[in-house]
Every structure is written in C-alpha cells, then in structure tokens.
Image (cartoon, helix red, strand yellow):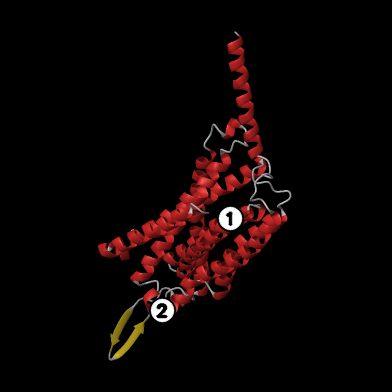
Amino acid sequence: MASNSKKASIFIIFMACLCTKALSQCEDQTNNPCNNKSKALPFKLIGIAAILVTSIIGVCIPLLTRSIPALSPDRSLFVIVKAFASGIILATGFMHVLPDSFDMLRSPCLDGNPWQRFPFTGFVAMLSAVFTLMVNSMATSMCTRTNNVVADEDVEPRDQEIPLAVINDGGMHLHGHHHGPKGTLGQQLLRYRVVAMVLELGIVAHSIVIGLGVGASNDVCTIKPLVAALCFHQMFEGMGLGGCILQAEYKTLKKTVMIFFFSVTTPFGIVLGILLSKSYKENSPGALIAVGVLNASSAGLLIYMALVDLLAADFMGPKLQGSIKLQMKSYAAVLLGAGGMSLMAKWA
C-alpha cells in the first residue's frame, strides 16, 4: 500500500513538472541566455535594411531584364526561370508557412479542446485555396466584362458592321475594312493581371507575419541566421512575383506600387514587431491563433497560385506542350527552386 502511494506521489510530481515546463514555454523566455533586447536591436535594424534591398533587387530583376532578348516572355529561357521561381513560391507555402501554422495551432499553450482535436491548419488552408479560386474567377469575369463595356463604348457604330470585301464595279475598287474594338485586352493578359494581384496579396500577408515575428523576438542566436535566410527568401520570391508583374504588362505607376508594397512589407513587419515587443508575446494564445490562422490562409493561397495559376497554366500551355525537352528543363527548374527553398527551412 505504501509502495503504491509512493508511486502515485512520484507520478503526480512528474506530471506537475511536465505541466510547469509546458506553462513556462508559454511565458516569455527570460531565462534564455540568448535573449538580449539591446544586442538584438542592431541585428533587427540591419535586417530591415538588408531585406529591403534584397526584396527590391529580387522583384526588379525580371523587369530590368526585359531589354535582354533571351529573357523576353516569349523565349524558352524566361519559361525556365519562371518555373524556377514558381518552385520557390510552392516551397514557401509547403515548407515555410504551412508548418509554422501547424506548430502554432497545435501549440501546448492552447487549450486541448478544440485546438488539439481538430486540424484547423488544413481546414483554413483548404478554405483559403477555394476562396482564392473564387477571387480569381470573379475578378477575371469582372475585368473581362468591364473591358468589353469600355471597348464597346470606344468603338463607333460604323466600324463594327463593315464586312471585309472587295467590290469591283467597272474598274472602281471599294475596300471595306473591319476595325476591331479599340483598347481591348486579351483574355490571357487579363489572367496575368489577376494572377499578379492575387499572388502579391498572399505574399504581402505572410511577409508581415514573418517580419512581426523577427521584430518581436529578442533571441540573438536565432535572429542572425534568420535575417540571412529571409534575404535569400525575399530575393527569390521577388523574382517569382516580378515575372508575373512583367507578364501582366502594367503601366509604370502600378508596377512601382506593387514593387513598393512587396519590398516594404517584411521591413514594416519587423518595425511593427519592435514597437509591439513589450506587449506582443509570440507564445500567448491570442498571438498563436491569429498568426497561425493567417499563416494557414497564406499557405493555401500560395500553394494554389503556384500549382494552378503558375505551374499548371505554363505546363499545359502550347509552348511547353510543344516541346518535351523544354518541359524536362522546366521540371528540373521547378525541383531546383523548390529544393533550394526547402533547404532554407532549416534556418528560416
């Protein structure tokens, strides 16, 4: 009897220690020797500048290479580079954003019911993918309808019904010419524009979350490698977005706005994290749920965009379907981009 009581006491003490350890992980890790707010701040400021510069470089590379004939959108090399960038975006969703959401929404800092019993990350990512499809479909329909209405208003009635014909009447030749609607955009160009806008939305959403985490953290041991990894991450992700912006053929002002928002979101997130570092606790239930749901939403959007709007659209298109050799090169580029970004998940 005494032996059973002793075993029960040992078990209770052991469970109490585990509960204390789990609860301590949910508090601010003040006992971590790497936590040093004064030493972490310079690395954050360096990270803001470095990530801003690499983001601008990455998104501008496809736009600046437009003058190079080999990298024009109708060339094979551009298709291969775009496949590489699409692989990076795909790996960002699967290997970076989605696992973070799983960790957050299944954290021991959250109540077991319902967070440990229902796969919220997969559910939210699924809804996000369906919502992205809905936005893509509706935005394309609205843009097409608006463009057709504007084109019809710009066309004079006499230009719409004149047939193409040549009438020979006693040496007199009358040529009728049909003038198509002015200012109409091709269906493919409309798709490129919708894809570019939706892709930027997903990238901006998860970039703010990444920056917020870096800014709120005071762990010097993780900030240094994380900033380096984020620089490469933003550069390669920017290349993918820049290729989409290039194909969308936006005017200079809209290109500048899209480049600006992509480049400043992660640095803005870091600044926001620094300002909120006293009140923002990354292991608090509210922060875990909010950031976890946002990460799951971003992951669903990025995975859908990479697979459906970027990879499937190109690989099922006439250019790649007409060349098995080009398909194999593009597949290799996808695997290279996805593999490289997956390796970076070790540090990011």
Residue 53 visible to the viewer: yes
Amino acid type indicated by mark 1: Ala
Question: On the picture, is 174 further left or further right than 342?
Answer: left
Reading the chain from its start, which is encountered first: label 2 or label 1? 2
Q: Which residue matches tag 2?
A: 68
Q: CA distance from mark 2 to mark 1?
A: 32 Å
> Which residue lies under the disc numbered 1?
205
Using the image, tell me which numbered label, if any, was put on residue 231. none
Classify the position of the N terminus by image quarter: top right
Extreme residue in the top direction: 1
**Residue 329's spot in the image, x, y percent?**
31, 63
Q: Is residue 184 visible?
A: no
Residue sitting at x 65%, y 45%: 287
Q: Residue at x 66, y 57 (%)?
A: 40
Q: Amino acid at mark 2?
A: Ile
Give 35 or 239, whichever is nearer the viewer. 35
Residue 164, given in percent of the width and then of the height, sits at 34, 77
Corner quadrant of residue 159: bottom left
Q: Is residue 53 left or right of residue 344?
A: right
**Vertical placement of 33 versus 148: above or below?**
above
Q: Residue at x 37, y 67 (%)?
A: 79
Residue 246, image x and y in percent? 47, 70
